[in-house]
Amino acid sequence: MTQLVPIELGDFCIVDSGFAFKSEQFSDDSTDVFLVKGSNLGHREIKWDDGPWWNADDFEKFSRYQLGTDDVLLAMDRPIVGGQLKYFWINKNDPKSLLVQRVARLRAKDPDDQIFLRYVIASPAFLQYIDTITTGVNVPHISGPDIRKYKFHRPNKKSRLKIAAVLETYDDLIENNLKRIKFLEEMAQITYDEWFVRMKFPGHEGAVFDEVTGLPEGWLTNNLGHYIDHEIGGGWGDEEISKEFSESAYVIRGTDFNGLPTGDTKNVPLRWHKKSNLASRKLIAGDIIFEVSGGSHHEGVAKTSLMTEELLSLFDEDVMCASFCKLARPTSIKVSHFLFYFLRFLRKSKASEVFEIRSASNIVNYNWTAFLKFQNVNIPNEQLLEEFYILSNNTTQQISVLAKQVKLSKEARDILLPRLMTGMIDIEQAELPEAMLQRVEQQEDA
């Protein structure tokens, strides 16, 4: 068994906090140096697109606060959100960045231990410790001394290196599959743009264009609402079952959209609903969820998610969308796939912003009724619609396989991590992700 030695985190690593960069000097130029602060640091992520940035000419001036590969970062204000710790580590290809105050940077005293340090912070025991010591009502916070006082049992160096290597292998597999999912999504969108925006669809060289509409013969133009059979706002239900709220269903919110393609459904809440409300809102394959309220001064709304059989199968109950979203059920599954990428194109090109209504508090609402009535869409002929559906559906299938691997790898890593860190499982008995996935496939085939 792995020999464990009790130690305080402050004896194992150096804990520093960032600089008080003045907000009036923040930059909106994404080519400048990124500032890592509590608002863009999340659970195992940094929101690199959110900013802010700092003048790149000052980078060397703030050398003490420069972030390097494998630096572990921990939010000191609101360190736990939704039961998850706000921490991340800098990757090799991440943007050049500086550390802002109220974010802690952890560096192992022995550089060989930097990866192991990541998993000390990732452990459930550290989350529990932070939850216990967090103080403050308006802004829950922790201090540098609080972080340093955390006690854990340290294995010998050989075991530490092996534990870090095994857990990092899981993380690398997860990250690679997430990149592949993102690539597949981007390629499908690029294909849509090439075929239906630049009009370089298969056979475009010989296509005959209508002189009046400017579209290829056989294409149709109608408002978006013409291609929607059923549309309705979402719901929220109640936390507890009652006579009135008797039907259970998961509720997908706009904040859940990004995780759905990767199989990340753990934060989608299960709530109780009126039978009549759920009946008209229960999601089926081909439904599109459209976010109509929320946003911020950084981004508007109009985010979308396409429901597929594979995605819905991840839930063990019925599913509906939240009250800040709309359910849109197109006239056919082929039209669903086409409209999904059409809506994503509108948002990416900012063409959907014309229907946004921004309040003084930066809350963004969407004029959904006007959107359905006045937003025109060009639908290709049946043959081309079929070709794009086949391509999109194949992409969905590939993403589903990768998402399943991500989900299984995360579950295995999260089970393995605390057991390795506490010595419950000897590192020599730890299963690598490739073997784990192969074992699962064999069990499913049996």
Image (cartoon, helix red, strand yellow):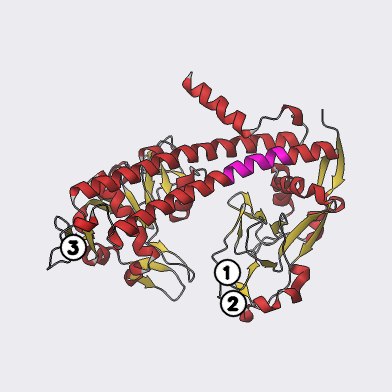
The local secondary structure at tag 3 comes to loop
Query: What is the number of the mark on residue 391?
Result: none
Residue labelled with disc 3: 215
Q: Quadrant of residue 349?
A: bottom left
Residue 334, given in percent of the width and then of the height, sits at 26, 46
The local secondary structure at tag 1 comes to loop
Q: CA distance from mark 2 to mark 1?
A: 8 Å
Residue labelled with disc 2: 27
Could you tell me if the residues under marks 3 and 1 are in contact, i.e. CB atoms within 8 Å?
Answer: no
Q: Amino acid at mark 3?
A: Leu
User: Which mark's residue is nearer the viewer, 3 or 1?
Assistant: 3
Number of marks: 3
Residue labelled with disc 1: 51
The local secondary structure at tag 2 comes to loop
Q: Amino acid at mark 2?
A: Ser
Please report the residue visible at 44 percent of the width from the left and 37 percent of the height from the top: 314
Please report the residue visible at 27 percent of the width from the left and 65 percent of the height from the top: 371
Residue 424 appears in the rendering: no
Q: CA distance from mark 3 to mark 1?
A: 41 Å
